């Protein structure tokens, strides 16, 4: 299923975002090499969604530039897919038709599209709900369908804005581990916004902690945990250290940590 997919490098160069008088971010410099996962954490309102929308070409930076595979983003670049909290499903299409839409966008033949659609639906645990409409699904199931649809386009860049934020804790955990598995299967570059520090560490090759007003990158942390990652990793001392460190940064929002913290 990976044929034809090529992950893209994403660069934010000195990106400043503003809405009128409100300066949201300043001087954001980040490079996400092709195929890597960058997690972004930071307090509510610091501009995480705004940055994702800039990467998707939906907002234009007031300063600096977003560059995907060497090209400055002006409109939504090809192969950039988003999973937002609001699922982004077509309400008038069944689960199967929603996912198939993504597959067909890539020009797959009808027969192979059906196979791929089935595979994706099974993968996100929606087997049996192919003919259901979004309004007949729970929030978690809609989220899975949204994920399957985003993966269906075999994106070069997958932008995820708190994709599990609306889910109950159990469903969330199940989907997290599904995502880890999917990460092995798909080569997309991923930028993953979350309020969960555990999730940020679990998925990220690196974690960018945003803070301040206007916000900037307080710290960019390498997550050297071995891959593929599984449940056990979240109990390792390295994981717990990283989590504590990031927790301190987020809570202090730029305030200096005491020595040795
Ligand atoms: N369309 C808009 N017009 C004006 N201001 C906006 C707009 N979108 C966002 N903002 C402002 O930009 C700032 C950052 O918003 P953004 O949604 O990016 O935050 P966030 O980090 O994603 O927060 P959360 O964690 O709560 O989702 C906020 O102060 C918000 O009020
Ligand atoms: Mg947001």
Image (spheres, rainbow, N blue to C red):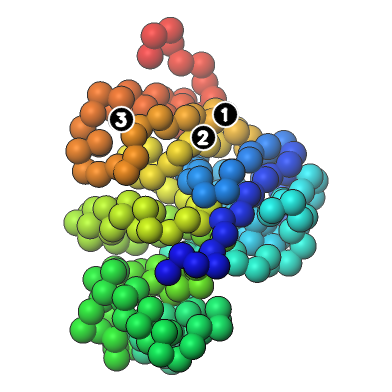
Residue carrying label 1: 218
Q: Nearer the viewer, residue 170 or 34?
A: 34
Query: Is label 3's Cβ within 8 Å of ligand 1?
Result: no
Any part of residue 214 in sight? no
Task: Looking at this view, name the residue that lies furthest to the right.
Answer: 63
First in residue order: circle 2 vs circle 3: 2
**To which quarter of the image does residue 117 belong?**
bottom left
Number of residues whose C-alpha sits closer than 10 Å to that of mark 1, classed few (under 14), some (14–19) or many (20 or more): some
Give me the C-alpha separation between circle 1 and circle 3: 20 Å
Q: Write down the residue under mark 2.
A: 209
Q: Nearer the viewer, residue 54 or 249?
A: 54
Judge depth for marks 1 and 3 and give the one in front. Answer: 3
- Residue 7, x across and y down, in percent: 56, 56
Q: Is residue 97 above or below residue 59?
A: below
Q: Position of residue 157 (x, y in %)?
A: 56, 58
| Front one among 7 and 251 | 7
Q: CA distance from mark 2 to mark 3?
A: 16 Å
**Residue at screen point 68% across, 38% down:** 28
Q: Is residue 201 above or below residue 104?
A: above
Task: Give percent across and percent down for residue 21.
Answer: 77, 49
Label 2 and label 1: CA atoms lie apart by: 6 Å
Residue 239's mark?
3
Identify whether 206 is placed above or below 95: above
């Amino acid at each position: 299923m990976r044929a034809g997919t090529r992950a893209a490098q994403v660069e934010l160069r000195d990106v400043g975002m503003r809405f009128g008088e409100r300066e949201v971010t300043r001087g954001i410099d980040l490079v996400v090499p092709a195929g890597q996962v960058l997690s972004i954490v930071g307090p509510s309102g610091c501009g995480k969604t705004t940055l994702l929308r800039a990467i998707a070409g939906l907002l234009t930076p007031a300063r600096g530039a977003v560059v995907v595979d060497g090209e400055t983003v002006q409109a939504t670049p090809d192969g950039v897919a988003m999973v937002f909290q609001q699922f982004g499903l077509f309400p008038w299409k069944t689960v199967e038709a929603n996912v198939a839409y993504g597959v067909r966008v890539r020009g797959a033949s009808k027969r192979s599209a059906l196979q791929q659609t089935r595979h994706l639906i099974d993968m996100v645990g929606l087997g049996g709900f192919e003919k259901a409409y979004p309004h007949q699904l729970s929030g978690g199931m809609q989220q899975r369908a949204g994920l399957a649809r985003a993966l269906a386009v075999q994106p070069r860049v997958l932008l995820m804005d708190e994709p599990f934020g609306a889910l109950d804790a159990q469903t969330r955990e199940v989907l997290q581990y599904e995502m880890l598995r999917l990460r092995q299967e798909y080569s997309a570059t991923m930028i993953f916004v979350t309020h969960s520090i555990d999730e940020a560490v679990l998925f990220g090759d690196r974690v960018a902690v945003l803070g301040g007003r206007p916000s900037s990158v307080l710290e960019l942390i390498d997550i050297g945990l071995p891959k593929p990652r599984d449940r056990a990793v979240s109990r390792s001392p390295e994981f717990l250290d990283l989590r504590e460190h990031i927790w301190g940064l987020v809570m202090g929002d730029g305030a200096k940590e005491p020595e040795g913290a």
